[in-house]
Image: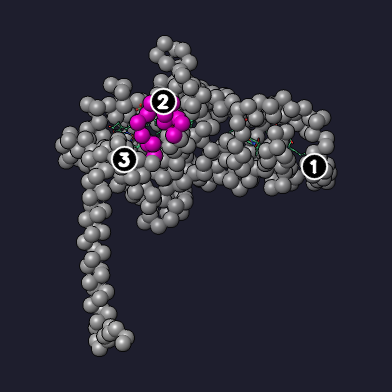
Amino acid sequence: MIRHTTRTELSKKQKKSNRNFKMREYKNLQFVAGMAMVTLLVALFNCGDARASDVGNCLLCHKYPGLSRIGENGKFRLFYVNENIFMNSVHAKVKCEGCHTDIQKIPHEPAKKVDCLRECHIIEPSSEQKFSHKEVAEFLSNSVHTKLDEKQKPKKYAEDMPYCLDCHDNPLYRPLSFFKRVRPGISEMALGRCRVCHKNDEFIFRFYNHVTTRLHTIRSPKNIAEMCGRCHDDPKVVARHNLTTKAVYSYGETFHGKAASYLDERIPDCLDCHVNRGKSVHQMLSHKDPLSITYETNKAAICSNIDCHPKATPRLANYKVHMEFDPIQSPREYYFKVFFITLTGGTLLPLMGIMFLDLFRRLFPNIKITRRK
Ligand code: HEC
Ligand code: HEC
Ligand code: HEC
Ligand code: HEC
Ligand code: HEC
Ligand code: HEC
């Protein structure tokens, strides 16, 4: 679910039944009172500071955190849109109706699902074509996450495959600061440079942001792992698709994942290893696919690439990046780990005991333990 509203998880079935739900049946629900008040507000103030993307004045109502009701299935639904988050999100320049095309009147009919592949009003400057995300869908259909198998038939459990909203929740930009790396955000120093030649601040802000945010991932490695973990740590999904590991959990067990959990950004995240160089992040392939960089005979190149371990020999790639320390799956590593924990504990604990007794004797040199007669 997209993050400009607060996350309310609706199953597909629930969403469908929402759509079938008729407006007149709402009458007995408590939100009507709130709605009447809000409608009154519409009449009273004709919203002065409507922002560029809010042509339809949608936020007039949707900016109220209380705009919610209990759905027909008893689930809480929140229709609040946080203006601040929305206005700083990737879609800030798209007006509400640009995506919610079916919302024409107030009160609305139940909304249709938003189509992420719609063409929008923007012209993409290098091709001069109308802009849309259609290409992304194509990349997805060439990836391991496609719903169709090689014969173009639906895969078994096709409903487990991720689509746009399963991975994307409209993240905020995380702008890059080139200068001194002290804080994120637009660097005034850099803007000063642009102003030498460009005169319009809006232009400068927009393009500075546009380019700099794409020079690194919008999410941190930790966030990316969390994104994938929604499915790849779900034991049911792992079992249904014959995967061998809880991928995010196992990543977290390795040095890479541990560093990611401390917000280190230099270490590889899922995308660094699973996306072939120069390809869209949406085109991840199975490690059984010979075209994939994670394929047995290709994977050495991941480790030894110039940004990571340039001097590494192919043997480094034998290192299991997805290792669950499990006595059945990886007995050698498991018992090795147990041995080291025992060794460390077995060495440190007696040592600490001796030190404690020694300290005790130093503090109380004359103390004696004598049995009472
Ligand atoms: C007069 C107040 C008001 C205005 C203005 C308004 N809305 Fe709403 N909107 C509501 C209320 C109340 C609900 C909850 C309806 C319900 O209970 O299903 C809602 C629900 C929605 C939903 C979810 C509906 C569903 O069935 O899932 C969407 C999407 C939505 N509004 C989009 C918009 C857009 C886009 C605009 C601007 C064009 C807009 N709204 C303007 C009051 C308003
Ligand atoms: C980039 C496209 C996009 C834009 C722009 C957009 N939305 Fe949405 N909105 C979505 C998607 C996707 C959903 C998730 C439901 C769905 O798939 O239809 C959603 C859901 C909603 C919901 C329903 C939440 C729920 O729990 O059912 C409301 C209300 C809503 N949007 C209001 C707005 C308002 C108000 C604006 C303008 C400030 C806006 N949206 C702008 C794509 C968009
Ligand atoms: C398997 C998860 C997944 C699915 C499904 C997915 N995306 Fe993405 N998408 C990502 C990741 C990961 C990124 C990079 C995020 C970052 O930079 O932090 C991304 C980035 C993007 C970008 C920015 C350009 C880029 O490639 O870096 C766009 C636009 C985008 N996705 C659109 C879509 C659309 C539209 C769909 C549905 C057709 C979709 N995505 C489905 C994971 C996914
Ligand atoms: C030394 C002068 C100079 C500086 C400094 C400069 N630009 Fe430019 N910029 C230009 C010129 C001249 C063009 C037109 C070049 C062309 O069309 O080949 C241009 C073109 C652009 C364009 C393409 C616009 C279009 O519609 O084709 C963008 C975007 C842009 N600059 C952004 C920036 C940003 C952001 C900064 C600061 C980080 C910056 N520029 C710094 C001189 C400069
Ligand atoms: C909505 C659930 C879902 C999400 C979210 C998701 N995946 Fe997947 N992924 C799957 C399923 C299901 C498969 C099994 C596909 C198959 O075998 O046909 C899969 C397969 C894969 C594979 C191939 C495994 C192999 O055989 O080598 C990789 C790699 C992968 N996903 C990476 C990712 C990454 C990275 C992310 C996060 C950006 C992600 N996935 C997000 C459901 C998901
Ligand atoms: C350091 C590189 C690296 C990183 C980081 C990485 N992977 Fe992998 N992944 C691999 C390789 C290589 C394989 C192929 C199997 C093997 O060699 O262990 C693989 C296999 C997989 C598989 C298939 C495993 C199976 O059970 O069949 C999935 C799913 C997967 N990775 C998802 C992810 C996700 C999600 C993340 C992020 C949390 C991630 N990977 C991070 C390199 C990596």
Task: Report the image quarter containing ligand 1.
Answer: top right
At x 70%, y 37%, the residue is: 74
Of residues 369 and 209, the one nearer the viewer is 369
Marks 1/3 in contact by CB < 8 Å: the verdict is no
The residue wearing badge 2 is: 241
Q: Is mark 2 within 8 Å of ligand 5?
A: yes
Horizontal side of residue 45 vs 65, given as left or right: right
The C terminus - image quarter: bottom left
Helix, strand, or loop for circle 3?
A: loop
**Discs 2/3, front:** 3
Helix, strand, or loop for circle 1?
A: loop
Q: Position of residue 315 (x, y in %)?
A: 17, 35
The residue wearing badge 3 is: 326
Which region is colored magenta?
235-248
Marks 2/1 in contact by CB < 8 Å: the verdict is no
Q: How is the image coloured?
A: one colour
The span from disc 1 to disc 3 (Cα, nearest Å) is 52 Å
Looking at marks 2 and 1 on the same chain, the residue that comes earlier in the sequence is marked by: 1
The N terminus - image quarter: top right
